[in-house]
Amino acid sequence: MLAAEVKPARMRLQGAIRRHSASIVRYLIVGGTTFALDFGLLVSFKEVAHVSVYVAATLSYLIALGFNFVLNRVWTFAARTSLEVHVTLYILLVIVNWLTTLVLIGAFQRLGLNYELAKLISIAPILTWNYLLYKMIFSIRKQPVDVGPTVVRPT
C-alpha cells in the first residue's frame, strides 16, 4: 500500500516542478547574481574605497537586498501590486533568515565545522524555503477595503 501512495505523490511533485521550472531558474539566477553583486561590492568598498570591512559589508548587503527584492518581485514572480505588503513581509523574512543563519552557523561550529562551511551548508534550507515564501509573498494582492453596502438614495 505504501508503494502505491508514493507513485502519485512523486508524480504530483514532478508536475509541480515542471509548472514552476521557469520561476525556479529565474530565482536561482537572481540569487547567484545577488551573491556576486554582494561579494563584488564588499571587495570594492573595502579594497578600492578603503572603508572598514563592517561598513563595506553593510553597504554591499543592503544594496544586494534591494537588488534581490526588485528582481524577484518584477522578473522572477512578476508581482504587480501591494508593494507595501511585499516590502514588509520581505523585511520580516530577511530577519528570520539572518537569525536562522546565526543559529545554524553556531550549531555547525559546535559540531566542529569551520564557519565558512557552516555558512555554505546553512544556505540550502534557506534557499529552499525562500523560494516557496517569496512565491507566496509576491503573489499577495492588496485586498480592497470593504466599507459596507452602498446605499443609493432616490433624488
Image (cartoon, grey):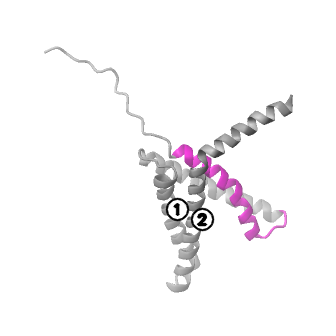
Relative depth, front residue between 100 and 143: 143
Q: Which mark is residue 87?
A: none
Relative depth, front residue between 51 and 134: 134
N-term mark: 2 or 1: 2
Query: Mark 1 falls on what kind of element?
Result: helix
Which residue is located at x 60 percent, y 46 percent?
20
Image position, residue 47 (x, y; %): 55, 85
Instruction: Determine whether 96 is above or below 120 in the image.
Output: above
Is 17 displayed left or right of 109 in the figure?
left
Is 23 displayed left or right of 82 in the figure?
right
Q: Amino acid at mark 2?
A: Gly
Task: Report the quarter where the N terminus lies.
Answer: top right
The magenta-colored residue range is 111-137
| Residue identifier under label 2 | 32
Task: Report the quarter where the C terminus lies.
Answer: top left
| Residue identifier under label 1 | 65
Quadrant position of residue 148: top left
Instruction: Determine whether 109 is above or below 54 in the image.
Output: above
Q: Amino acid at mark 1?
A: Leu
